Amino acid sequence: MKKILCVIFVVISIAVFAEGKYDKYERFLDISPENYQESTYKSWSAYHPLDNSIIPSVSKQDILRAGKAGKNIAIIVASDIADSIIPDIELYTFDLTADGYNVFSYSISEVHPETLRDFLFELYTVLGIEGAVFVGNITPAWFQLESDFGDGGYAEWPMDYFYMELNGVWIDSVDFTSTPVSGSDGIYEDHDGDLMPEIYIGRIMPTGFSNYIPIVKNYIAKNDEYRTDFINIEKTALVYVDDDWIPWASTWAWDVSLLYPDYTLISDAETTRVDNYKTNLDTLHEWVSLFAHSWPGGHGFYYNNKADMEYMSASEYTFLVPPTLFYNFFCCSYARYTDNNYGTGLAVFADTFSLMGIGSTKTGSMLDFSYFYEPLASGKNIGEAFKDWFVYQAEGGFTIDEISWFGGMTIIGDPFIYPTHEYLSGIEDNKKTNSSEEKSIGIIDFKKGIYFKSEELNSVLYTSGCDLYDVNGMKLRKAQAKGIYYIIKESAGGRIVKKVILL
């Protein structure tokens, strides 16, 4: 099995050995219009010192509960926001539980990456978790290459694969602060042993806000609305390919079609420009795959036979609020979550709709797309499909070329979502329509005599002019026990369905 080594003379030999497989694809460029400076291990660490004050442990109750039917998963919450989002994590847990997961929640401070990885390994071996989501500023692990892509110069980046591959050996033995010398610099540069991923992870991580608690709360709320079928967007995809990758546009669109047979492909060299992209973003598409040169702060689109480039700021995702739920950003460094206001984060954590973005924290992105879309089409969740894709990449070890392309890949948002899954599966014919009349009716509120959520344990859930159902689709007169219920109201535009949590 090959391993990644970054001592200079070894890098050169491996790079030559790996040459060829991905050379046909145009590499990314540093196209930022203002000499953008990406975050580094040093700059991130200066504002996020390690803190070992809160290290969770697995309880006996957790071990007993792990044996119950269901898929075991973990929610890892940053300790600085944990107390402020307790009701939100409870709602998220209810939603995941309703979808068949056994959920284990823990709070942790910004510990050393090895400490967090050891805890994830414990959750994997003792509880049998298949995946985890990080909520808040959970410590990133950093990786570095002396020669990115074999000839691209030094690169360092946050690497979430470190938290997916749990029983191999990650090595920090070279200091690259100047001329490479033996010694640790806090950044990994080698990976040995078993390289296959054991789990998948995702990050609910807005970065760059002094108070990001409201953003996390809003994200969980809209995630709940999607899971209760109150966000319902046409199951179509937009595949938008800028100039450098037009030769592969049809192939990549076919890969997306494995999940979304109904798709729109736009790949004309003089059509793919900022205004055209924004116009298409404003069209209902559940999934958007964008192929464009980028940096954490925006995209660049060629025009005039590649003589010119125009730019789109990442902040425009928050102004436009595209009616899109999922993104796959084939966009350089667009998921670099250690950068303030990074692009994938702005898209995913916008006020409404968006829930997940696949992207890279470095120069590079996803290739071999069928190994991602086929598992999704077969019914796996985002994290499972992402893990399957990484299993394919890890076979035979990672070459320098492969780690350069794929080493920064990560999931921003909820990794437990099934794009093809029909939620509220216990209730038949419950999909709401998009009619204006239904939207004008809106969600029934307290004033109309219907309690959607109560923090009082003895509250009674009742309805007035609506039907009440349990999670199995059984119609009820009222509910007093804690649990998940659904209220359905018939309207001229169709059914309005709302999940109800009685705490």
Image (cartoon, grey):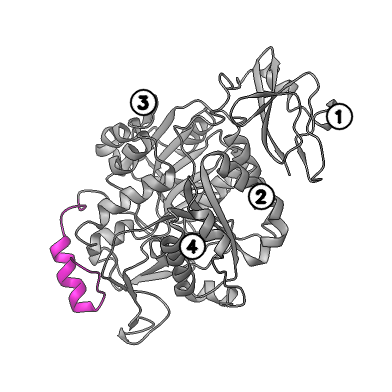
Foreground disc of the pair 1, 3? 1
Front residue (pair 302, 201): 201
Asked if disc 4 and disc 3 are in contact, CB closer than 8 Å, the reply is no
Q: Amino acid at mark 1?
A: Lys
Which residue is rendered at x = 79% and y = 33% of the image?
A: 451
- The image shows residue 226 at horizontal and vertical percentages of 58, 35
Question: Counting residues from the N terminus, which is met first, the one under dot 4 or under dot 1?
Answer: 4
| Marking on residue 447 | 1
Q: Distance of mark 4 from mark 2, alpha carbons?
A: 39 Å
Question: Counting residues from the N terminus, which is met first, the one under dot 4 or under dot 2?
Answer: 4
- Which residue is most to the bottom? 182
In this rendering, is residue 45 above or below 286? below
The residue at which mark 3 appears reads as: 261
In this rendering, is residue 137 above or below 7? above
| Marking on residue 90 | 2
Which region of the structure is painted magenta? 1-23
